[in-house]
Structure formats: structure tokens, C-alpha cells
Amino acid sequence: MAKKIVKQKKKLAHSGHSGGFLSFERRRNIEGFLFSVPWLFGFTWFILIPLLLSVRISFFSTVLTDPYGFEGTSTWVGFDNYVEIVKTPEYGQTVIESFLTALYQVPVIVGFALFVAVLLKQDFPGRVYYRVIFFIPVILCGVIMSYLFADSVGSVSVFSTLVSTNSGVLSRVFGGRIISTITSGIGTIMWKSSVEILIFLAALQSVPAILYEVVELDGATAWESFWHVTLPYISPFVILNCIYAMVDAFVDTSNPVMGIMTRLMNEGTKYGMASALSWMYMILTLLTILIFVLLTRRWLR
């Protein structure tokens, strides 16, 4: 009898009519669509349309009165903007430098984030407060962080003061150029690794404790446990953080390519070249990420 009632309820829920009105399943579908409408509107208005307009601008020599070329004042130049970008040595050199900078920044940021996440996972007094400290840069807006890093703004630069106070002794011990490069980037690394630390913390907490117990019974050290249990288990998160760090490095405001785009736009008549450079740079970034994913996909198996 109970099975018959359950079958009747399922049939009623999936039927086209429920008491002369919409079925439960169709109501849920409509509710889901209504909840997604604001996102669809925001995506279309703030992302999709600007992307399409950006593609259009890249084929025009624009003027301020007609930036999109709808009024006929701007001149259609086809792929001339792209050709000009390729022909200009400055742009190519800047793109290569930005890629090389990201090439060494990403491993440092991801490695530092993993190191800190492993430390913060340990059980010690005040662990919650230390986690908050490392996540503070994400809470603070970019403008505030830029003031902290700037040397020429205000009378005190927090990170520059710390570096200048201790870099003299450290330089004599470890070597001037190496330690200068490391210390000057400490604040930037802490700022850019905050999200990665949070992701790694979540990943580390998802590793089953029984795996550690098994390798401990086999006599594995903490180092061997990390390499043979922790790292293979969280390898998808390592790849995710690498991709996140790459995207963050490519679109960072300190990236020289972003500076060139800003300079071209500020000139007022080179919106087309700025748009062409942005699309070429985005395609190169996506190709880099695609190559990285293809090279590391065996880690996901």
C-alpha cells in the first residue's frame, strides 16, 4: 500500500498537470529560471555586450565623438590595428616581459600559499587569528593595498619600511641582488597569495585523516606523508591555484601590458589599438592556460 502511494505521488509530481496547475517539477524549473534572470541580465549587459563592442572597436580608427563607429565618424581599418601591434617592437617586448614575469611569479605565489596553508592547518594556539591575518589583503580593497605598497604616497610605506630596515643585514649574509629581489616582493606575494591560501586550506582539510594514519603505521615521516599523500590528493587544487595565479598576474594593474592599454586609451584616438592589443593579449593568455592544463592533466587522473 505504501509503495502504491509513493508511485502515485511521483506520477503526480512528474505529470503535466497537478490539480489543474503546473506540476512540482515545472514549478521548480520556472523558479530556477527566475533566480538566474538577474545573473543573465548582468552577464549580458556588463560582460557580453562590452566584449562584442570591444571586438568592433578593434577594427576601427576611433574618435571620441564616435568610439563605437555607429555614427560613421570613426574609420573602418580592418586588421590594421592588429598589424600595427605586431609591427611595433615595444608592444611585443612588453608582452614577452609580462609573460616571463608571470613565469616566475606563479610558482613563487603558489608555493608560498601551499607552505602557509600547511602551517595554518596545524593545531596551535591562535590559529584562527593567523588565518585572518593572511586573508586580510583580500578583505582590503585594492586602493588601500596600493597605498601600503607605494613609496611615494604619504609619509610611511609599511612594506618598504620593513624591507629597508632589514635588507642591509640580510644582503650582507645572503647576497645583495638575490635578497633585494626577495624582500622587495614579500608584500606583493602575501597580497596575491591570500585566495590561494584559502583554497589550499579547504583542500588540505578534505584529505581523509585515515590516509595519514595508514602511512604513519607504515613508518612514513611527515615529509614522506606530504609527498605521497597530501600533494597527490590536492593536486587538482594546485592546478586550480596555478591557473588563478596566472590570470591574476596577467591582468594585474602593475602589468606593463595593462599600462600600455591605459596609455593608448588616454590618448583618445587609439581605442582601436588598445582593444586590438587587449584581444591579442587575452588570446595569448588563454593559449598559455590551455597549454598548462594539457601538460598537467595527468595530475587530475
Image (cartoon, rainbow, N blue to C red):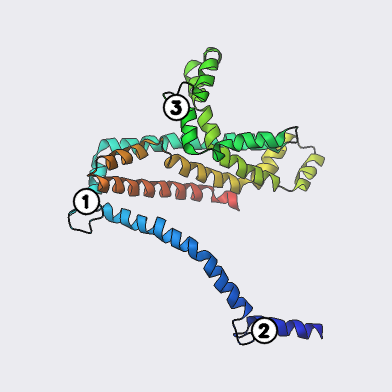
Name the residue: 32% across, 53% down.
54
Q: Nearer the viewer, mark 1 or mark 3?
A: 1
- Quadrant (top left, top right, bottom left, bottom right) of the N terminus: bottom right
Amino acid type indicated by mark 2? Leu
Name the residue: 49% across, 50% down.
294
Mark-to-mark CA distance, 3 and 2: 66 Å
Q: Position of residue 243 (x, y in %)?
A: 51, 46
Q: Nearer the viewer, mark 2 or mark 1?
A: 1
User: CB atoms at circles 2 and 1 under 8 Å apart?
Assistant: no
Question: Can you identify the residue that label 1 sits on?
Answer: 65
Residue 260: quadrant of the picture: top left
Name the residue: 52% across, 29% down.
187
Residue 12 numbered mark, or none: 2
Residue 76 visible here: no
User: CB atoms at circles 3 and 2 under 8 Å apart?
Assistant: no
Q: Earlier in the sequence, mark 1 or mark 3?
A: 1
Name the residue: 28% across, 40% down.
266
Q: Position of residue 115 (x, y in %)?
A: 63, 34
Badge 3 element: loop
Amino acid type indicated by mark 3? Ala
Vertical relation: 178 (above or below) 68? above
Residue 150 numbered mark, or none: 3
Amino acid type indicated by mark 1? Thr
Vertical relation: 252 (above or below) 33? above
